[in-house]
Image: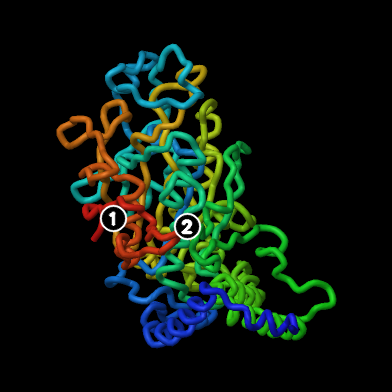
Amino acid sequence: MDPIRELELTMTRRQLFGRTIMGVGTAALSQLLHASGLGFLADQEDGLPKLGKPRPGIGGLPHFQPRAKRVIMLCMNGGPSQLDLFEHKPKLRELYDTDLPEDIRNGQRLTTMTSGQTRFPIAPTKYDFKKYDNNDDGVWVSELLPHTASVVPELCVIRSMWTEAINHDPAVTYIQTGSQLPGRPSLGAWTSYGLGSMNEDLPTYVVLHSKVSSGDADQALFSRLWGTGFLPSEHQGVSLRSSGDPVLYLSNPDGVDSVLRRKTLNDLEKLNELQLNQFGDPEISARIKQYEMAYRMQTSVPELMDLSKESDKTFELYGQESKTPGTFAANCLLARRLAERGVRFIQIYHRGWDQHTNLTGNLPKQCKDVDQACAALIKDLKQRGMLEDTLVIWGGEFGRTVYCQGPLSKANYGRDHHPRCFTMWMAGGGVKPGITYGQTDDFGYNIVDKTGNVIEPSIETFTPGAVHIHDLHATVLNRLGIDHTRLTYRYQGRDFRLTDVHGHVVKDLIL
């Protein structure tokens, strides 16, 4: 028998159902999904490229009217010290170099870096704090973040974040994917899958990596942190580079012009469609879409990366470092440009916040890298009328201990990982501005209630005053118009979701 004919007749039971589902599903989806209802396309200011036709997500989303159209997540990888930035504990200075009371630590699991210490001496911050009032509340901010202090009226500061993870890789994997184990879809991938894109000429989900002034970017970042896990691969984050082609192989190779590239892609699409019709593998469909996206990005990405039309006033707002590709300031400016152009989810990574020793040598450098740009991003979005529908999130994977790791002096000290309480902030996108949420004890070690009693939060139930990673994710999805319990994907016989079987929307944080 002709082997080609034999191949054509080959059809497994799975392929039969796959073809049937593809045909019926496509017909149904064509009626259910209308881009105009999911794109949230806004009128654009003069000078901006017109957004391409949006790509819808899955049917039935958003579940309700969203307050945010997009998310900008500022990831301070390594664990910023809340005690030196946002947790004002002046009484600790009276306890310098005394041992942390055993009943405060209460048998907490320690890392291998400090588990062998014979004592746990208290290390008060050497930095001064100032309270910035807004209505009846106030936010304490360290002298290391003067620009962030200027946007306190826009900030929703959470002082009672907590996580079970105590080491970097499981902790950062947790806050990015909702699981300490690798292999799950990232928050950005879930958002892309659920809501789709507002612009067909740029990826739905973009990742930017920043240079670090301290030179101590110890913790590795793996592409799985912005990956899709078991979701279709078209929803993965696309990393933009600061030198050379922003995306690898974006430019045509020597001897290939745009006409030849287009003809090649047309032929390749026909071959892929033959495979798609035969096997019904959704990854083939994703591959076709990615090839087309890459072709459109040859025009859209160079225009995006060209900052020549930005005003001197804008560069002054973000700081002169915003003119240097790859800096955190330049990436924040790019984030605003991506948001204007309809990118749904934007992440900026800044490494080097893992100060086990020499905290006072490196933390000021880290803060200088990000402080002005974070504040500028909020101000820039607000003056353009975009902050109200853009959710900005700042924070790391956990916090730092009140006790010192390594040598202690009043001028310098180090801090170990601390998952029991740490600080993050959000702004815009339907969260309450100018508030603080949650409290910690006098040592900044445990979450406490309003009467000062220690809270032992549980992942199983929502504890008022405490915000778990799953609660943060549920709240972010809520601002995007998504019920986190209903955004699911069936894989290996089980319906998975970002928050697993946990998570609660923290209603005290949202408008």
User: Percent from the top left, x then y, of residue 86?
Assistant: 36, 38
Q: Residues within 10 Å of mark 1 (few under 14, many from 20)?
A: many
**Of residues 456 and 357, which is closer to you in this image?**
456
Label 2: element kind = loop
Toward the right, the furthest residue is 255
User: Percent from the top left, x then y, of residue 134?
Assistant: 25, 50
Q: Quadrant of the C terminus?
A: bottom left
**Of residues 373 and 63, which is closer to you in this image?**
63
Mark 2 — residue?
185
Label 1: element kind = loop
94 sits left or right of 339 in the view: left
Q: Check disc 2 and give the amino acid type.
A: Pro
Mark 1 or mark 2, whichever is nearer to me: 2
**Of residues 122 and 88, which is closer to you in this image?**
122
Q: Quadrant of residue 486?
A: bottom left
Q: Earlier in the sequence, mark 1 or mark 2?
A: 2
Name the colouring of the figure: rainbow
Q: Residue at x 37, y 50 (%)?
A: 150
Q: CA distance from mark 1 to mark 2?
A: 30 Å
Mark 1 — residue?
433
Pointer 1 with pointer 2, Cβ within 8 A: no
Q: Is residue 267 visible?
A: yes
